Image: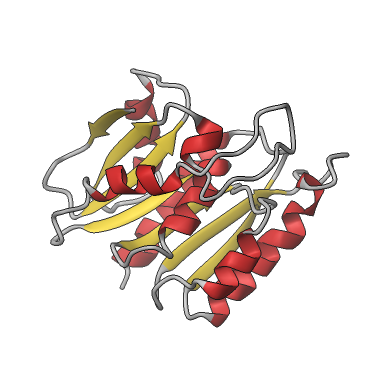
Amino acid sequence: MTIREFGPPSAPYVLIEPIGDYDPDGIEGDYNKIRQRTDAEFRLITIAVDSWNCDLSPWKAPAVFGKEDFGDGAEELLKAVLSLCEDRSKTYIIGGYSLAGLFALWAATRTDVFRGVAAASPSAWFPGLTEYLREHGMPCGTVVSLSLGDREARTRNPVMSTVDTRIREIRDILQEQGADVTLTWNPGNHFAEPDIRTAKAYAEVLQRLNGK
C-alpha cells in the first residue's frame, strides 16, 4: 500500500481515506476540493490499497458483480490506519467512497479513535453489514455523514438494488445507538462525481465537529 499526506502537519483534524488506483497527483486535488467547502484546518492522508475487494472487506462474501469475491483484509488495513493515528491531540476522521465508505463505517465500530465518519455512497448493500451494525455500534456521539446517489438503486443487480433501503436502515441504526448522523442524497448513479461526493462528506463532518 502507498501512503501520501497533504496539508499542514500542525492541523488539528486528520482525514484518512483508503483509495483504489494510486494517483500521484490526485491527493492535492482531493485536498483542495475539501478545502473549498470548509474553513477547518486539516491534513489529508490517503492509503492506496493493493486489492480493493479484499483489503476493504471486513469478512468474506461472494461476488455480486464481476467474478472477484470479497475477502476479509479489513483487519490488516485497520492496523495500518491506526498506526497513523497515534497523536491523540488530533481529531481523526475516517472516510471513503463505495467499498471504502463501508470500511470507514466498520472501522468506527472497532475503535474509539475516530470522531467522525465520511461515508460517501458506501456499499450499504454489502451482505451482513446492517446486521453487524445492529450488534456492534460505534461510540456515542460519533459524527457520521452518509450519502447516496438518487439513481444508485436503479440496477438489475438484486443485491445492489437494495442500497437505498439499506442505507436508510444504517442511518436509523446508528441514530438509535447515539451517533450524530445525516443522510444526503446526491444526483446520479454510483459513478457520478465520486471525488465531489467524498469531498462534501468530509467537509460536512469537519464543519459539524468544528462547530462543537
Q: Residue at x 59, y 73 (%)?
A: 134
Residue 157: image location, x then y, percent: 83, 40
Q: Is residue 109 above or below residue 35?
A: below
Residue occupying the far right of the picture = 156
Q: Residue at x 42, y 67 (%)?
A: 143
Q: Is residue 26 above or below residue 99?
A: above
Q: Is residue 178 above or below residue 107?
A: below
Q: Residue at x 31, y 67 (%)?
A: 112
Answer with the quarter of the image where residue 34 lies: top left
Q: Specify how the rendered protein is coloured.
A: secondary structure
Q: Residue at x 27, y 53 (%)?
A: 40
* Residue 97 visible in the displayed image: no
* Residue 166 visible in the displayed image: yes
Residue 212 as seen in the image, left or right of residue 190: left
Answer with the quarter of the image where residue 133 lies: bottom right
The quarter of the picture where the C terminus appears is: bottom left
Residue 38: image location, x then y, percent: 35, 50
Q: Nearest the camera: 211 or 160?
A: 160
The quarter of the picture where the N terminus appears is: top left
